Amino acid sequence: MTARRARPERTCIGCRQRAPANELLRFVAVGDGDHYRLRPDPDRRLPGRGAHLHPEPACLALAFKRHAFGRALRKVGVVDTGELAEHIHASTITPDHPTGRVSQQQGRTTDMSTR
């Protein structure tokens, strides 16, 4: 009988749930000083300290709301999440959805007929 090898797990900085590393998107901070941008690293090859996030807009929004990027990457300054957000939104495109994207609607509906 062969020994089973444990799969590495990481924590999503958005929802704080642990998941196998291959289900999370790794990203790194690029830039020096007070400004840096987040670069997606799907191949897990870029140098530097990385952090992990589910490739879902909801986890990205939670990470942004919690100010988790600076803590996870041990960086201080202004963060540019544009490249990371584009990568995540592009990965949520589905061919069966009429607009090609998963709905981004959040919150409660305002149906006045039930009041």
Image: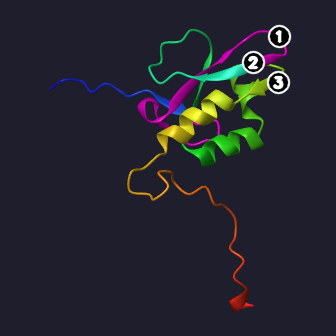
Question: Badge 2: how crowded within 10 Å, few (<14), some, or many (20+)?
Answer: some
> Magenta residues?
12-35
Looking at marks 3 and 2 on the same chain, the residue that comes earlier in the sequence is marked by 2
User: Mark 1 or mark 3, which is nearer the start of the sequence?
Assistant: 1
| Quarter-of-image position of residue 79 | top right
Give the residue type that dot 2 points to.
Tyr
Q: Are marks 3 and 2 in contact (CB under 8 Å)?
A: yes
What is the x, y in percent for residue 18? 53, 39
Instruction: Say if mark 1 contacts mark 2, CB within 8 Å.
Output: yes
Residue at 49% across, 45% down: 92
> Between 39 and 5, which is closer to the camera in this rendering?
39
- Within 10 angstroms of label 1, few (less than 14), some, or many (20 or more) residues? few
The residue indicated by pointer 1 is: 33
Identify the residue at image location x=43%, y=26%: 8
Q: Position of residue 57 (x, y in %)?
A: 60, 45
Q: Name the residue under label 2.
A: 36
Measured along the vertical axis of the image, is residue 114 above or below residue 62?
Answer: below
Q: Is residue 23 magenta?
A: yes
- Residue at image location 47% in from the left, 46% down from the top: 93
Residue 18: which disc? none
Colour logic: rainbow
Q: Between 11 and 97, which is closer to the camera in this rendering?
A: 97
Between 43 and 110, the one lying in front of the other is: 110
Query: What label sits on residue 78 in the rendered view?
Result: 3
Indicate the amino acid at tag 1: Gly
Instruction: Classify mark 1: helix, strand or loop.
Output: loop
The quadrant in which the C terminus is found is bottom right
Q: Say if 67 sits above or below 103 in the image.
A: above
Label 3 packing within 10 angstroms: few (<14), some (14-19), many (20+): few
Identity of the residue furthest to the left in this view:
1
Q: Position of residue 26 (x, y in %)?
A: 54, 26
| Amino acid type assigned to the residue bearing label 3 in the image | Val
